[in-house]
């Protein structure tokens, strides 16, 4: 299983979810039992009864920022689209974008206000100028200096929009995206994509889990641009993962260790949580840790901390599908995905979920 072609499948386009379900907990949940190979069809709202008292849920509390930008080149008026990636030194931004022609250091871009939810104030806001400072050819990004004294999160909120995945085929965000492409527990801003397994959770569902004796703890991983990039090599051992910043706080480590000591299961909510916990467990057991990770979980990886996983259905030939298959076994996941297609589950970010027990 060292070939990315082993992780391919055909998905009818109609099963790609372009919008979230009416309620977060209305999503369907496929339950896969590794010990027996049985597959059950349930709903997210039934999660508390599918887990055991003494188990521990671990969720990623990152917050998606409105990182998608659009405007024009001040000198030519040509359209420009970009994506904010991170802060650089002295308040500059690291941005990737595209336009006709070749950008030059020293020129400026003019961002226009986000048009969907702020039409009433768009006319009152002038374009935001970004001065191009330096090109970073290894990533294709630019260091840009916003010509404004406002904090960067405030500027992004005014001029940016939700960076929806490219497989959601619409020109711009809808009013519901600002709320629904965000978990209800998002507190640490920094992601350009949502940790989508967490989108299914409400405070009420988490409370139900806790009332059943299931612990709830947090990690942070800021999902980066690489989540949208396809695997371009055939051999998995030749693929280089993008680096993403993550953190496992000491209080989470304490609860996880106590859960394991008592015989409970560690249930990761999403692949970002898996990569965070496993990155902090590389010396054998989980430790408090923060830093960048480029961990690529693929066969024959042996999981050190994560026991079970709740995750959405992933793109063909993606590192996320490889991760899930490493945990559950490629043939079982292949069969589960085929059954999901036949049962018309909704796929990808706004879609349904799978629980691997």
Image (cartoon, rainbow, N blue to C red):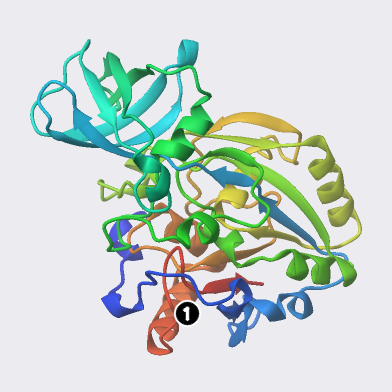
Q: Note whether residue 140 is visible.
A: no
Instruction: Bin the neighbour count of mark 1 within 10 Å (Cα to Cα): few under 14, some 14-19, many 20 and up.
Output: many
As rendered, which of 57 and 35 lies closer to the eye? Answer: 57
Q: Note whether residue 110 is visible.
A: yes
Q: Residue at x 40, y 40 (%)?
A: 160
Q: Residue 327 appears at what percent x and percent y?
A: 56, 62
Q: Quadrant of the C terminus?
A: bottom right
Q: Residue 34 appears at what percent x and percent y?
A: 62, 75
Which residue in the structure is indicated by mark 1?
336
Q: Residue at x 64, y 76 (%)?
A: 44
From the viewer's perspective, tell me whether residue 92 is left or right of residue 129: right
From the viewer's perspective, tell me whether residue 253 is left or right of residue 308: right
Q: Quadrant of the N terminus?
A: bottom left
Total count of labels: 1
- Judging from the image, what secondary structure is the residue with disc 1 in? helix
Q: Residue at x 30, y 49 (%)?
A: 231
Q: Residue 165 appears at what percent x and percent y?
A: 36, 55
Compared with 238, 137 (above or below) is above
């Amino acid at each position: 299983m060292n070939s990315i072609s082993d992780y391919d499948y055909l998905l009818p386009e109609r099963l790609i979810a372009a919008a979230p379900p009416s309620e977060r907990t209305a999503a369907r949940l496929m339950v896969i039992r590794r010990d027996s190979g049985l597959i059950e069809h349930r709903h997210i709202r039934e999660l508390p009864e599918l887990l055991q008292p003494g188990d521990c849920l671990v969720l990623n509390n990152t917050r998606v920022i409105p990182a998608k930008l659009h405007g024009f080149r001040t000198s030519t008026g040509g359209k420009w689209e970009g994506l904010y990636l991170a802060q650089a030194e002295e308040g500059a931004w690291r941005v990737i974008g595209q336009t006709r022609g070749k950008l030059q250091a020293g020129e400026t871009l003019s961002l226009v206000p986000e048009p969907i939810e702020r039409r009433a104030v768009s006319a009152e806001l002038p374009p935001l100028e970004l001065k191009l400072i330096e090109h970073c050819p290894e990533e294709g990004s630019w260091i840009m200096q916003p010509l404004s004294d406002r904090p960067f999160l405030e500027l992004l909120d005014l001029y940016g929009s939700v960076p929806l995945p490219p497989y959601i085929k619409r020109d711009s965000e809808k009013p519901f995206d600002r709320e629904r492409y965000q978990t209800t527990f998002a507190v640490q801003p920094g992601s350009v994509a949502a940790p989508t397994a967490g989108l299914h959770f409400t405070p009420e569902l988490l409370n139900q889990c806790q009332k059943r004796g299931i612990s709830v703890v947090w990690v942070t991983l800021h999902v980066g641009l690489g989540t949208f990039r396809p695997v371009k090599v055939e051999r998995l051992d030749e693929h280089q993962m993008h680096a993403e910043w993550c953190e496992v706080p000491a209080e989470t480590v304490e609860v996880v260790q106590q859960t394991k000591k008592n015989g409970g299961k560690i249930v990761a909510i999403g692949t970002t949580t898996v990569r965070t916990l496993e990155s902090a467990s590389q010396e054998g057991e989980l430790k408090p840790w923060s830093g960048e990770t480029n961990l690529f979980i693929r066969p024959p990886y042996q999981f050190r901390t994560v026991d079970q996983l709740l995750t959405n259905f992933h793109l063909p030939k993606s590192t996320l599908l490889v991760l899930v298959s490493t945990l559950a076994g490629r043939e079982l996941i292949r069969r589960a995905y085929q059954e999901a297609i036949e049962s018309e589950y909704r796929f990808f970010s706004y879609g349904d979920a799978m629980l691997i027990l």
